[in-house]
Amino acid sequence: MDKRYTSLTLQQQLELRRKAVDDVLIHPEWKLAAAIRHLKKTMRLTTAELAKLSGVALRTLQDIEQERSEGSVQTMNRILAVLGLKLGVVRAAQHPTQ
């Protein structure tokens, strides 16, 4: 956990993770980079910690967060798997006029 924050109990850590996941799921309009940044910040992780947890290179994660790279589907799934999520395809919402 990011050392700028005080230590949390396991229960508090789980609550932060639930909140992070819920936030991302209710904001499908977020770009992947924004979702990753939000997950990392909400869970109080540094980029290095998230990279280590996900098995993704630090530089790769930095590039994704700073929108220099979109990352591959495999890379995104490795990052999202930390929270039990995976990248998927959904049908776009149809407008009422269609």
Image (cartoon, helix red, strand yellow):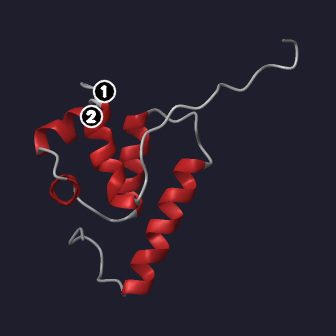
* Vertical arrangement, residue 82 with respect to residue 1, above or below: above
Residue projecting furthest to the top: 98
Against 94, is 25 above or below? below
Contact? badges 2 and 1 (CB < 8 Å): yes
Q: Quadrant location of the C terminus?
A: top right
Write the residue at 37% across / 87% down. Answer: 9
Where is residue 42 drawn, in percent x and y? 42, 61
Q: Position of residue 84 (x, y in %)?
A: 41, 59
- Quadrant of residue 61 in the image? top left
Report how far apart the C-alphas of labels 2 and 1 lie in the structure: 6 Å
Q: Which residue is mark 1?
A: 70
**Can you tell which quarter of the image residue 28 is in?**
top right
Question: Quick one: label 2 or label 1, which is nearer the N terminus?
Answer: 2
Q: Is residue 97 rendered to the left or right of residue 73?
A: right
Return the residue at label 2: 64
In front of the other: 89 or 21? 89
Quadrant of the image for the N terminus? bottom left
Where 25 sits versus 2, above or below? above
Query: Is the residue marked by circle 2 packed among few (<14), some (14-19), or many (20+) residues within 10 Å?
Result: many
Neighbour tally class for label 1: few under 14, some 14-19, many 20 plus, Cα within 10 Å: some
